[in-house]
Amino acid sequence: MAVRTTRTLKTASYAEGRTFGGFGEFETIDFEIEYAVAPTHLANHSIVDIDKAPTDDQGRVRFKGNARLTYPRKQKPSALLVDVPNRGRPMAFSFNRPKPAELQNTNMPAGDGFLCRHGFAVLSVGWQFDAEGFSLEIPEAIENGAALRGEAICQMQPSRDTNSLLVGQGGVFTYEPTGTGRLYKRATTRDAYQEILTSKWQFGRIRDGTFKPSSRYISKEGGFTKGVIYTLVYETEGAPIVGLGLLALRDATTWFRHEFAWPLEAPDYAIAYGASQTGRILRHFLYENLNQDESNRQVFDLVLPHIAGGQRGDFNHRFAQPGSLGIPALGQRFPFALRDSHDIHSRRTEGLLQSNSNAPKIISTNTSWEYWRGDAALIHTHTDGESDIEPLENERIYMFAGTHHINGVVPPTKQLILTNEELPYVLNTISYTPLLRAALINGLRWLTDDIEPPPSRYPNFSDRTLVDRDEVLNRFATLPYFQALPDASSLPSLWFTDLGDHAEEGICAHPATLLASYPSGVSAVDESLNEVAGIRLPEIAVPIGIHSGWHPRHERHGATDQAVTFAGFSIFDIPQAIPSSRATCEKAVTQVADQLVAERYVLPEDQTLVIDNAMRRYDVAIETATAKPQE
């Protein structure tokens, strides 16, 4: 068995004993799980460096992590929802629409009880070796009795001028520098790397004018300039076998499906949900053909990668950093779509699904931001940038029009807390949660009742709703409202890259040589400058304001030709984009909500929520217009 032992750490009543409809009370159990996998087993052969892992007396590779199960105490769960934590933080409980105050006390909030009311048992599994919270302890690869040496890479773009920068990705320090390094700069991710002389920088931190050596910071003569992209490649020693995190997701899931002593019956189905980083690891999981364990048991019946775009990630190569935000490496390479397609650059024909024998059903959801990041359109278009790829029969693709990566924020703010950046315009306010909840329940019914979800909705070439980014930016340039817009030529894309002679072995040469960029399509916009493709909530369809998945950088942070990470904007103070009266608006909003429910893109239970959300944005629009100084 790949799960060697499990140890119960803590058992507690969930949500202080609150009952959730017919599923009653829920309970949580915290576990420590010890894994033991066979390095030579065919089911594990895709894990990079597993052949270099230390083994026990039975020839198995051991590692351990934590997990938490939240389940109905006296009912059979409708399904096992496997929550893939993002950098150690559970993600699935966001389906419950928790209030901010609730999030201060727990990372698994009950909110409005959505998941429990629908009977899901939620399993959060530690998989990331360098995360806090839900995490995994994994061995390092050993060759000829010694730890492996190699190079790690990190990318930094300061939002203000500074003397020193933290070494790491997403705030995580993963690999200790052991020797020299190379530091590069470039203005955009499309530019060539310009190496900075080694005499001009060093490891260490400058505070209050004093330099102190430190492996966790770099400092540069003259300081680092806001908006400039700096890339550090440095020597390190000790290569954790990062891909074991994929096996932890696989083996924890099948253990709870088949071995755990459920109070009544085990759930019949397992659904995987991941968002952003963990949506990408689910795409990587499928690409590595891991949806079958060592005992030939299927792992997931349904996979929901949310806001993953067309990428995989740093989840299975030597010196990989799972928290990396898209530095060109193996996880940013072709293929991007599930269905087989031909890559015009590598001349390979391939799809993410390597095998149909154990393929789950897949529902991919993205916001406008992942399209503007430059990669989401690649999950349904050929790399020639001229034709569509039809989704598989077991696949649905949904774009949530006019939304952004981090979901909507109300009341309006011009502060991006995640990166501590000031914004020139209001952060996007649209909540896509009702659409995501419908995708989950439609997926559940696909499994339990064989009721297919509604058709895919996304921009495409066939109806001319998929266009280049500069076409949309040119439309916005006609508005005098904007002081500055991003330059399409400065925005990111995925690249056909050269990662060195050993890339196929999972060993990357950094930084990657950028050979050719892949197309970066986005939705066209209508007369109101709102997106025409995807699933359009009332704020887009009526419309109530102008909403985007991109946002110009504020001039005080530099690089104004680029876009803010994660963010879009909402504009309410352009009169032609706002209904003439509240009654007119509410009537139009209700009609759109009715249609979305009829088409099953919104659940009946969320119809009122969709209407209330839209009308709250209308009130914000009126308040904004009233507060605007009269000229």
Image: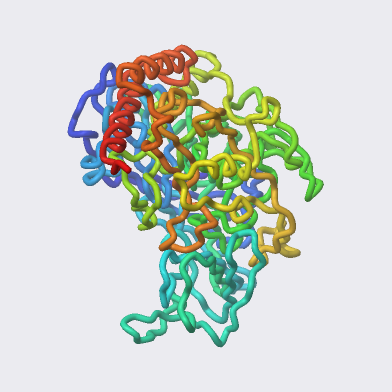
The number of numbered discs placed on residues in the rendered structure image is 0
Position above or below: 479 against 515: above
Q: Nearer the viewer, residue 339 or 435?
A: 435
Question: Which image quarter is the C terminus in?
Answer: top left
Viewer-proximal residue among 541 and 92: 541
Residue under the point 35% across and 41% down: 68
Residue 320 location, x and y as percent? Answer: 56, 60
Quarter holding residue 19: top left
Please state if 584 lies on the left or on the right of 298 as rendered: left
Q: Residue furthest front?
A: 631
* Left-right relation of 19 to 266: left
Residue extending furthest right? 347
The image quadrant that residue 70 belongs to is: top left
Give whichever of 68, 170 is nearer the camera. 170
Instruction: Identify the residue shown where x is 46% and y is 31%.
Output: 258
Whether residue 560 appears in this view of the structure is yes
Q: Residue at x 28, y 30 (%)?
A: 619
Task: Say whether residue 11 is left or right of residue 480.
Answer: left
The percent position of residue 214, horizontal first and vertical second, equals: 41, 80
Report the residue that reaches farthest toward the left. 16
**Residue 572's spot in the image, x, y percent?**
37, 36
**Where is residue 78, by image quadrant?**
top left
From what the image shows, is residue 599 above or below residue 122?
A: above
* Whether residue 363 can be seen here: no
User: Can you say whether 237 is above or below 338 in the image?
Assistant: below
Q: Residue at x 41, y 74 (%)?
A: 162
> In the image, residue 224 lies at what x, y percent?
47, 74
In the picture shown, does residue 557 fall above or below 428?
Answer: below
